Image (cartoon, grey):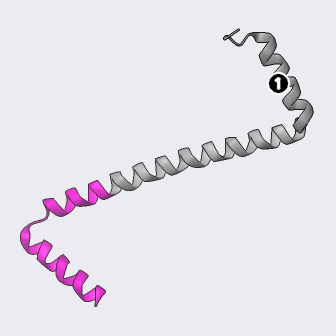
Amino acid sequence: MGQIGPWQIIIVVVLVVLLFGRGKISALMGDVAKGIRSFRKGLTEEEADEQAEAKSLENKQEQPAGERAADAEKDSKVNS
């Protein structure tokens, strides 16, 4: 009695299709797929941003001290 058999699953699927209709279920699955695609796109964009930021930090660390001071001075003039 505690296990769900294949017949119970079939009955539930048939009831869901009868209640909501095939079109509504297809639209819902399409929305779920769009959400998954958007989530994956966001993850890849975030990873790309992190890689670009890490690369820029590496480049700043490789600059000699005099160039870093000049860059900081330019940034302070731009922000003012």
Q: Which of the pair 3/37 is nearer the observer?
A: 3
How far from the left and from the top, in percent, is residue 45? 47, 52
Taking the image as shown, residue 16 lies to the left or right of residue 35, namely: right
Q: What residue is at 29 percent from the left and 86 percent from the top?
A: 78
Relative to residue 3, is residue 72 drawn left or right? left
| Residue that label 1 marks | 13
In percent of width and height, residue 58 lies at 20, 56
Residue 71 position (above or below residue 14): below
Q: Is residue 1 above or below residue 37?
A: above
Magenta stretch containing residue 67, yes or no?
Answer: yes
Q: Nearer the viewer, residue 62 or 53?
A: 53
The number of discs equals 1
Identified at 15% across, 60% down, the residue is: 61
Question: Residue shown at 68%/46% (left/top)?
Answer: 34
* Residue 77 within the segment the image draws in magenta: yes
- What is the secondary structure assignment of the residue under circle 1? helix
Residue 1, image x, y percentages: 71, 8
Q: For the view shown, which residue lies furthest in the front direction? A: 1
Q: Which residue is drawn at 7% across and 70% down?
A: 65
Whole-percent x, y for residue 51 in the image:
34, 51
Front one among 61 and 50: 50
Query: Residue 67 or 15: which is nearer the viewer?
Result: 15
Q: What stretch is highlighted in magenta?
A: 53-80
Q: Which amino acid does label 1 sit on?
A: Val
